[in-house]
């Protein structure tokens, strides 16, 4: 009997917490001004770096990052030209990595991940 009572008491806070979590998730979804579906898109670049010094390589990396940010924002334009009536970028993540191998040019690997809230046509 004591074991059953303990099990019941232990379950009560979990179910209450689950209800609070579900309500919070539902509330946060209503914060999106666009009803519809979420789209995720990735853009990747693999390019040799031409600079030989550290500052030049950093400048090239920065230029590629800026390019990825601009292209990321442009994804909504592409979707609206094809399948969407409304589009909002909800997050962008850009990452870069420079790989160096002796005797070979350094290569930059850059990726942008874009999440958008889209209303379809």
Image: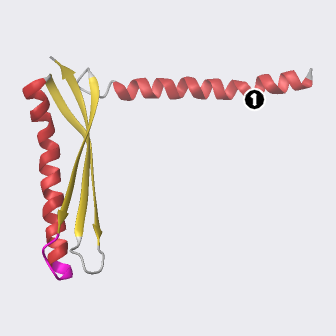
Q: Check if residue 47 falls in the magenta segment.
A: no
Classify the position of the N terminus by image quarter.
top right
**Outermost right residue:** 1
How dense is the environment of label 1, judged by Cα within 10 Å: few (below 14), some, or many (20 and up)? few
**Outermost top residue:** 121
Q: Is residue 19 above or below residue 104?
A: above
Front residue of this view, candidates 115 and 3: 115
Give me the residue at 83% from left, 27% from top: 6
- 12 relative to 49 in the view: left or right: right
Q: Position of residue 120 (x, y in %)?
A: 19, 19
Q: Find residue 119 and report its image quarter.
A: top left
Q: Position of residue 116 (x, y in %)?
A: 24, 34
Classify the position of the C terminus by image quarter.
top left
**Outermost bottom residue:** 53
Give me the residue at 17% from left, 67% from top: 48
Q: Is residue 103 above or below residue 21?
A: below
Give me the residue at 17% from left, 83% from top: 53
- The residue indicated by pointer 1 is 10
**Numbered disc total:** 1
Q: Check if residue 54 falls in the magenta segment.
A: yes
- 7 relative to 36 in the view: left or right: right
Front residue of this view, candidates 43 and 22: 43
Q: Find residue 79 and report its image quarter.
A: top left
Q: Which residues are magenta?
A: 49-55
**Outermost front residue:** 103
């Amino acid at each position: 009997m004591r074991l059953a009572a303990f099990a019941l008491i232990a379950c009560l806070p979990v179910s209450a917490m689950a209800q609070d979590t579900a309500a919070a998730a539902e509330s946060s979804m209503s914060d999106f001004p666009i009803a519809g579906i979420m789209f995720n898109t990735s853009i990747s670049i693999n390019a040799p770096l031409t600079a030989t010094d550290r500052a030049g390589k950093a400048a090239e990396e920065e230029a590629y990052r800026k390019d990825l940010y601009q292209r990321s924002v442009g994804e909504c334009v592409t979707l609206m030209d094809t399948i969407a009536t409304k589009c909002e970028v909800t997050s962008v993540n850009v990452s870069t990595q420079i790989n160096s191998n002796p005797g070979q040019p350094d290569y930059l690997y850059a990726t942008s991940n874009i999440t958008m809230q889209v209303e379809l046509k």
